[in-house]
């Protein structure tokens, strides 16, 4: 074993004198660390200054040795040093003064930057690799500190002579050696991270959204409007914008949706003084029925909600005297036909009141099919303003739609292949660790979504990358939710766990879940799911052995209704 070299190879433009010394020092025994071209900044007489040493040697049992290298001829006249170059010119030098100054400045730098360093033995010397020097050259240049051409053949003896002259006795522990090494030859990787992408993508998405809003503004005079748009086309943003504009024009506005978390997010857009009532349909029903002192069913079923809830809502609104000049519905594809009749009955003047519905027939997961609630002006949103192009392309493939012709560039969609569902937590934890620790993404910008509630419960039972997990509404750093509950919402980064893509509902949930990611999407699932996603992603294999079904339509539908409408 020989010395460790920093760097391990020299650049081509290093002077031949330094290269000869480097080749000799490379033969020092194990334990020595040899640093070439060490430069630093430190205070000199109270002002910032630069420092540099040709070589710095470090050994735990010796300490530090600074070596200056001089390659030309030397002449000493009345104690003044001169060196000659190849053109015959002479220059005044002070090699030992330079070595002494470098040593002192380097010690000051290390004591300033290495915590608890303590005493660090240090010495210096000057090496003349092309000369033979067999004498003392003055009080500052004793023979023991002069290395010459002959010392190139036995560098270990030469360095030990220097250590003996300075009586160096290091006693450095491994931690101190590594700390000094880090300061003399830092290892730092400065690379492009996903966090930087997120900032840039967000700015460009905002610009696209403004374009979409300007295009939609032309429909202000239409009384009945149905806005169709796929995932990511900005329906919720436009719904909020329409409600706000109508309120500014003096309308009393009802803004509602199916999903409870989305309803809470909509409500947060408006203050108490705003003439906009915003909440999910279920929350509005509970609130109004309670305020009207009406009798609520003991255990309302999904069938009761579809067939009878509307009448109770209208009765409650009548008792409370609730009427609106405009109704705006997001997630219209999930509303029962009776709900639309109830909402229309809440208009103060159905003949002139505005009714705007935003819907995506591809996101139907609670009932079969989608039928428009009334004859209306149709407006189709074609521009994806939420997702980057790689995500939008993958989402479109889930439903057999055409890939977007325009959009925002972003990182490719990733896939993680796993069939070991008992170790799902570990798999997702690795993904989150890379996002948060390596890609420097804020935990609040990451959401983990699952097709099945049991997968969600499994992930909630432990930490992910050492970070606590929680449902929507919690203060946990990492949100874990079912796709049902997160429908209508979005996140900069989404980790989507897909068990299978068999059947319409499973593919619909995949379409919804994948489209929640604005800037980066990672899909976790078995090999056959990853293949169907067809993203051209970078697979990371965990294990491909077991298979487990993703649940029937009725099972997933019951889970989803309970999650989305949770009171």
Image: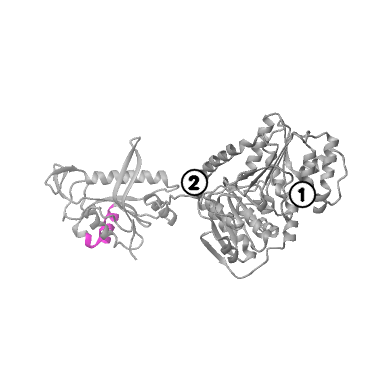
Q: Is residue 551 left or right of residue 142?
A: right
Q: Position of residue 119 (x, y in %)?
A: 39, 48
Whichever of labels 1 and 2 marks the residue nearer the N terminus, that label is: 2
Residue 336 visible, this orientation = yes
Where residue 292 appears, as percent x and y from the top left, is 85, 38
* Left or right of 242 on screen, residue 23: left
* Range of magenta residues: 152-165
17 relative to 552, above or below:
above
> Would you say the residues marked 1 and 2 are in contact, meaning their CB atoms lie under 8 Å apart?
no
Residue designated by label 1: 336
**Residue sitting nearer the eye, 234 or 128:** 234
Q: Residue furthest left?
A: 88
Residues 129 and 338: in front is: 338
Image quadrant holding the N terminus, namely bottom left
Q: Which mark lies nearer to you, 1 or 2?
A: 1
Percent x, y for residue 89? 13, 44
Q: Which residue is mark 2?
A: 196
Q: Residue at x 68, y 66 (%)?
A: 549
In the displayed orientation, state which residue is furthest to the top: 250
- Helix, strand or loop at label 2? It is helix
Query: Where is residue 456, by image quadrant?
Result: bottom right
| Image height of 71 relative to 323, above or below | below
Main secondary structure found in the magenta portion: helix
């Amino acid at each position: 074993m020989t010395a460790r070299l920093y760097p391990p190879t020299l650049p081509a433009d290093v002077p031949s004198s330094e290269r000869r010394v480097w080749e000799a020092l490379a033969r020092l025994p194990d334990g020595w660390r040899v640093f070439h071209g060490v430069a630093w900044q430190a205070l000199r007489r109270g002002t910032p200054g630069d420092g540099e040493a040709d070589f710095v040697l470090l050994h735990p049992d010796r300490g530090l040795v600074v070596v200056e290298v001089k390659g030309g001829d030397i002449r000493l006249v009345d104690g003044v040093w001169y060196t000659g170059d190849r053109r015959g010119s002479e220059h005044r030098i002070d090699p030992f003064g330079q070595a002494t100054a470098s040593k002192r400045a380097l010690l000051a730098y290390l004591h300033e930057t290495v915590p608890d360093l303590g005493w660090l033995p240090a010495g210096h010397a000057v090496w003349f690799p092309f000369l033979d020097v067999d004498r003392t050259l003055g009080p500052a240049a004793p023979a023991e500190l002069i290395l010459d051409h002959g010392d190139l053949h036995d560098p270990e003896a030469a360095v030990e002579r220097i250590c003996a002259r300075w009586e160096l006795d290091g006693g450095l522990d491994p931690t101190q050696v590594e700390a000094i090494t880090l300061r003399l030859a830092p290892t730092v990787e400065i690379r492009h991270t996903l966090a930087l992408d997120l900032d840039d993508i967000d700015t460009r998405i905002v610009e696209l959204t403004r374009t979409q809003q300007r295009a939609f503004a032309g429909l202000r005079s239409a009384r009945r409007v149905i806005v169709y748009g796929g995932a990511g086309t900005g329906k919720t943003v436009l719904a909020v914008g329409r409600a706000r504009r109508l309120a500014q024009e003096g309308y009393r506005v009802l803004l509602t949706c199916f999903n409870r978390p989305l309803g809470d997010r909509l409500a947060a857009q408006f203050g108490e003084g705003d003439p906009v009532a915003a909440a999910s349909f279920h929350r509005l029903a509970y609130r109004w029925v309670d305020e009207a002192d009406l009798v609520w069913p003991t255990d309302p079923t999904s069938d009761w909600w579809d067939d009878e809830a509307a009448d109770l809502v209208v009765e409650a609104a009548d008792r409370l005297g609730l009427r609106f000049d405009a109704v705006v519905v997001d997630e219209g594809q999930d509303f029962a036909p009776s709900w639309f009749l109830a909402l229309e009955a809440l208009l103060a003047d159905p003949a002139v009141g505005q009714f705007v519905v935003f819907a995506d027939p591809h996101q139907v997961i609670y009932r079969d099919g989608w039928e428009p609630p009334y004859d209306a002006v149709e407006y189709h949103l074609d521009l994806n303003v939420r997702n980057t192009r790689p995500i939008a392309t993958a989402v479109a493939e889930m439903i057999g739609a055409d890939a977007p012709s325009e959009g925002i560039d972003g990182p490719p969609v990733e896939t993680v292949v796993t069939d070991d569902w008992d170790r799902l937590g570990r798999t997702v934890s690795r993904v989150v660790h890379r996002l948060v620790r390596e890609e420097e993404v804020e935990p609040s910008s990451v959401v983990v979504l699952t097709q099945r509630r049991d997968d969600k419960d499994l992930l909630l039972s432990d930490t992910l990358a050492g970070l606590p997990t929680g449902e929507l509404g919690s203060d946990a750093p990492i949100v874990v939710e079912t796709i049902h509950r997160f429908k209508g919402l979005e996140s900069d980064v989404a980790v989507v766990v897909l068990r299978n893509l068999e059947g319409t509902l499973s593919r619909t949930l995949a379409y919804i879940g994948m489209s929640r990611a604005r800037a980066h999407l990672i899909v976790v699932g078995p090999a056959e799911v990853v293949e169907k996603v067809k993203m051209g992603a970078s697979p990371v294999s965990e294990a491909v052995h077991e298979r487990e079904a993703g649940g029937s339509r009725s099972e997933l539908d019951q889970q989803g209704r309970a999650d989305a409408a949770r009171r």
